[in-house]
Amino acid sequence: MGAYSSCWHNRLQGALFLLAFLTWGIGDAVTCLWMIEHRGIMGEANIIARSIIIDYGASSFIVIKIWFTSIVLLFIPFLIQKRSQEPVYWMINGYFFSFFIAGALAMILNIQAAQNEALLFSPEQVIFLFLGSVLILTSIGEEIDKRTNPRIRNYFDCFLYDIAKFLAFIINKK
């Protein structure tokens, strides 16, 4: 079955992926549009997002943001992990956590801007924090991976295991 009898590594990484997706992908997009509704399109600091919204509309912006987030920025690490000969588990967790931090800060800034409040950080500071956290957290993760050599189970096997446990719980509950 693998090195571990449980799937906690998979659950942790899945939770970090979900947090990154919900904040950086969906949360940032939704709060961006809410901020634009209150402040106008020029309130958006990201020129790419602004151009997409102007040229293609808000719904296209959300679709593009979700596709870009899920495929390009968040699923690529899973492919790297699957194909890598070296352990990259904690390095990828650092990467996901960096996107969670950036997404949470982007949401906070969008909400503050929409309400005409003083910003916690400037957009430039958030970008700097994001890039710094990616470099630092992935480096720390890489070092942990080298020292611990973690092996995780197949995600599909863990998914099936969790479904079986859940169904067994429901059946035994009756």
Image (tube, rainbow, N blue to C red):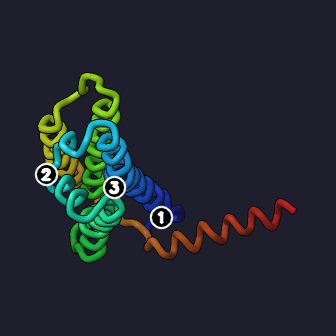
Residue indicated by mark 3: 25
Label located before the other in sequence (3 or 2) = 3
Residue 150 in view in this figure: no
Judging depth in this view, the residue of 64 and 77 nearest the camera is 64
Crowdedness of circle 2 by 10 Å Cα count: few (<14), some, many (20+)?
few
Residue indicated by mark 2: 47
Q: Residue at x 67, y 66 (%)?
A: 165
Q: Residue at x 83, y 60 (%)?
A: 173
Q: Is residue 96 above or below residue 125?
A: below
The mark closer to the camera, 3 or 1, is 3
Q: Secondary structure at mark 3?
A: helix
Q: Secondary structure at mark 2?
A: helix
Residue indicated by mark 1: 4
What whole-number distance in Å separates the C-alpha atoms at marks 3 and 2? Answer: 17 Å
**Residue 44: % across, % down:** 21, 44
- Pick the quarter of the image with the C terminus: bottom right
